[in-house]
Amino acid sequence: MQIISGTAVAEKVIEECRREIAELTAQGRKPGLAVVLVGDDPASRAYVRSKDKKCRDLGLHSVKLELPATTTQEELLAHVRVLNNDPEIHGILVQSPPPKHIDEAAIVRAIDPAKDVDGFHPVNVAKLALEDPTGFVPCTPLGCQRLLIDAGIETSGAHAVVVGRSMIVGKPMALLLMAKGKGGDATVTVTHSRTRDLAAITRTADIIIAAIGRPHFIKAEHVKEGAVVIDVGINRVDDPTSEKGYKLVGDVAYDEVAPKCRAITPVPGGVGPMTIAMLMANTIKACKQSEQR
Ligand code: NDP
């Protein structure tokens, strides 16, 4: 059984980014990312901090905009417009979830698609479906695909079952896996909460992508011998033995599933580190493409 280390692959992606940044710097260009946080949700704050830190480590131009929870839709839209017009900013992301009074879909649509490094703008969703390489693909599924490629998992002709159909993970994951080419060409089944007899379907999978948001949901009975399992889930569960009082676990019951697998990602240290690495890669891509516009 192979444990696919997201930490190691993410480090490789970051090294590639470092090289590309050095080339861009030599040409007098510097990729810039703006991360906008509205409100003071502690998990979002932590994500924004780590994105900002990674940018700075890499020598990217990083703008962290922390706005109060009382920020109105109009005020947020105005900030997005300023960033859209800022030539030093190539990537913009508004940390999800914003406070309830904010219409998140409208904010995403207001971001210039050429700077939408999260890949959530309708133009980028369409480009993914169209297999247009100039589009931006959401970072988490892009990271999952990269893990499969780096681990030497053949996706061509494989039956991949995606559990979950969110716009952030499940749906773009399915599109990536069915696209033509490297890391694609799979036969894809997408499942969700209305799927009948989920285990019967996942047991036919050569590759399972679990993106459900329920701790330890995928059990040994869901997995055939020799399957590859990518666990996207990040769930907090109580753990009185840890200092924080909780620990992070995946959507897969790792201990019982891993022995059946040909390869599996752990949580933490699997998909998680890939997401931020792919964000850096998308920001560099946005910078490069901005010169071609
Ligand atoms: P969502 O809640 O948006 O989507 C969950 C999906 O799982 C839905 O499509 C839902 O179906 C499906 N689902 C729920 N219950 C069942 C069930 N009993 N059987 C089958 N399918 C079910 O979550 P996300 O896609 O945003 O995230 C999924 C997980 O990935 C979470 O743990 C999240 O924390 C993690 N995540 C990790 C990231 C990373 O960086 N590693 C980034 C993003 C997410 P339906 O559509 O019918 O409701």
Image: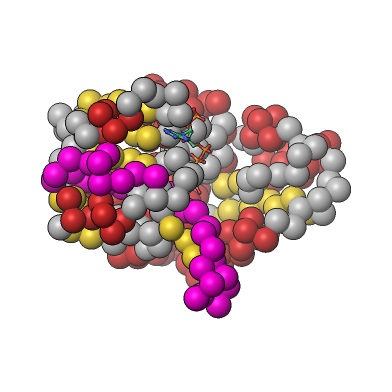
Q: x, y (%) of residue 42?
A: 67, 61
Number of numbered discs visible in the structure rendering: 0
Q: Is residue 89 above or below residue 192?
A: below
Q: Is residue 92 magenta?
A: no
Image quarter of residue 217: top left
Residue 137 relative to residue 190: left or right:
right
Residue 161 relative to residue 151: left or right:
right
Comparing 85 with 175, the one in front is 175
Comparing 171 with 64, the one in front is 171
Q: Is residue 233 above or below residue 126?
A: below
Image quarter of residue 78: top right
* Residue at 22% in and 26% down: 187
Q: Is residue 268 above or below residue 67?
A: below
* Magenta span of residues: 217-246
Residue 175 visible in image: no
* Residue at 63% in and 48% down: 95
> Coloring scheme of the render?
secondary structure
Q: Quadrant of the N terminus?
A: bottom left
Residue 50 relative to residue 202: left or right:
right
* Residue at 82% in and 54% down: 68
Comparing 281 with 258, the one in front is 258
Q: Is residue 227 magenta?
A: yes
Q: x, y (%) of residue 51?
A: 55, 60
Comparing 163 with 194, the one in front is 194
Residue 244 visible in image: yes
Q: x, y (%) of residue 70?
A: 86, 48
Q: x, y (%) of residue 48?
A: 61, 59
Q: Is residue 193 above or below residue 266?
A: above
* Residue at 74% in and 57% down: 40
